[in-house]
Amino acid sequence: MSKLMPRKYFNLDPDQGVLIGIVIFWLLLFLSTGSLWSGFHFIDDHEIVMINHDLMTANLNLLEVIGKWIHYDYNHARFRPLYYLHRVIATDIFGLNWFLWYLQNAFLAIITTWLLYKSARVIEFTVQESLFLASLTLLGEPAIIWWRLGTPETIAIPLLAIALLCAALAAKSQTTRWQYDSLFVIFACLTALCKEAMILFLPAVGLIRIWLESYFNPTSIRQSIKSCLLSILGLTVIFGSAIFYIWRVIGLGGTGYAGVGQDSLNLEKIWTACLSLFEAGYLWIPVSILSLTSLLAIKDQQFNFNRFKSLISVVIIFFVAIIPQVFLYAKSGLIGHYFLPAVWACALLTVYTLRWHRDYSRWGGRVFSFAIVLIIGISMVTTWKACLVFAQDGHRTQALLNQLQRCTIPNQPILVVANPRVNFELSNSLKRYLTYAAQRDQLFLATYGIENAHFFSDSYQDEEAGLKFLDPKTVDSFYKDQTVKNIKNKNQIKAIVVLSSDKLKQDFLSSAKDWFDPANYQESNYRLDYASVSITLYCRNM
């Protein structure tokens, strides 16, 4: 056997083995959960349907479509030009082939994990420490960016990973420093153009560059800043220009559920955001390490503040990274993809404190390393489960849409029943898909809510209270003011889609007694766990 399989094929470099492991992990995740074939989701994917329509039938060329969607982003008080540039170009390439979209995300997950790992290896972290850094950053709640098709972080984090790798290479290299520094600034700039939160991360990125300079070339802070002055000035110009543009042109109010406002200074919300980050970033590990090290030093009567000096730079980077993110997301709360990029700073702090602690206590280092391995193992399981839930929702969504298309033909009336606030995005997403992907444009709306709805209902009073920033009349505009009241002969309605749970269903049945008879319709139900909604479809009997 050894003659057939030369030994050299098994003598892999550790980094090569890690790369193979990364590829296997992400491919297995997407394959075993069925995410590659999960198809259209109501969350985010309706924009792709609209962009595809613009490219295919709206008589607009690629540049015009890019300009249209960047302007659309601007009109919604957002600054994500590169995100929409990529979104339009990807739609031009992939169309509505959802398999290719998810395959792209699988590739981005692989390359980002590898880049974060490699950047840690360049700064002389061990294989174990580098894997810890990449895994703590990308697994768990933040992993949502790889199976959702509408998060700017899906593009921003790979670009950030490239920038971090270039920063490390620039600090370590003597002959090609300016080339890596140039790439560092370019990719940091591209990262900032993906999302506003990434702009606020630029000061931390600049500090990382200075820290890496002093890490590889032990000199004073002043000399380190001087050595990478041009790249720091470049980042400063980019940061200042982006902040000024958002402040003076776009505004700071955000989209209603997020942005800078009074809630950004609400101590309760800030504390909640801090607790969320503490949990998602596993910050109890560095806190425990620092506490244990301090106790050991006091016990041995060898406490010396100088021992902690090597940590100061990383701690400063950590706070400069997370504080803007906490204030930015205090209004909406830190969930899912909002944890990025702050969670990378948490991972850096965790791994660096572990590395630092090993100089003082080998057994302590082993205990904490074992704890991190357990955490990563649990995160792998939770990541797989979350990906599976999302994929199953996609399969159920496709079953719903297929059944709806089977029981109707183009130009037959379809009634959509919704709460105008709770089902705001869902009603818009369904409208866009049916109109532009399924050629079902005879869509009529019936809304039930506490104000500005077609029918009064207080069934979702508590939920609507937290969504006051949404105007119920906007949902009418999605449907071009085509409401149930415009249908004179309601027997012509071929299908009815109720976009929520039993409460909305009962509201509809109570108000439609004069014309709706359940015996004349075939009922089917579709539970979408990720979207926390149960959709009922009534198809008229043939």
Image: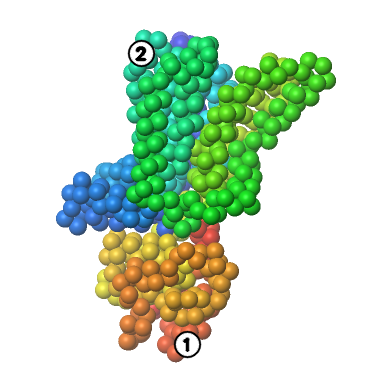
Q: Amino acid at mark 1?
A: Lys
The residue nearer to you, when weighing 445 against 490, is 445
Q: x and y percent of residue 344 in the render?
A: 53, 33
Q: Secondary structure at mark 2?
A: loop
Viewer-side residue, 50 vs 75:
75
**Residue 389 in the figure: left or right of residue 189:** right
- Tell me the residue that label 1 is attached to: 513
Q: How many marks?
A: 2
Q: Identify which residue is drawn at 64% across, 47% down.
A: 271
Does residue 173 appear in this view? Answer: yes
Q: Residues within 10 Å of mark 1 (few under 14, many from 20)?
A: few
The numbered mark at residue 449 is: none
The residue under label 2 is 176
The image shows residue 20, relative to residue 241, as above or below, that is: above
The residues bearing labels 2 and 1 have C-alpha atoms spaced at a distance of: 76 Å
Name above or below for residue 353 compared with residue 241.
above
Task: Inspect the image, locate mark 2, and give the three-letter code of the amino acid beneath it.
Answer: Thr
Q: Quadrant of the C terminus?
A: bottom left
The earlier-in-sequence mark between 2 and 1 is 2
Viewer-nearest of discs 2 and 1: 2
Residue at 55%, 38% in the rendered image: 322
What residue is shown at x 82% (from left), y 16% (from top)? 301
Q: Position of residue 204 (x, y in %)?
A: 49, 31
Tag 1's secondary structure? loop
Q: Is residue 16 visible?
A: no
In the depicted structure, whether residue 344 falls above or below residue 404 = above
Q: Nearer the viewer, residue 358 or 464?
A: 464
Which quadrant of the view contains residue 444?
Answer: bottom left
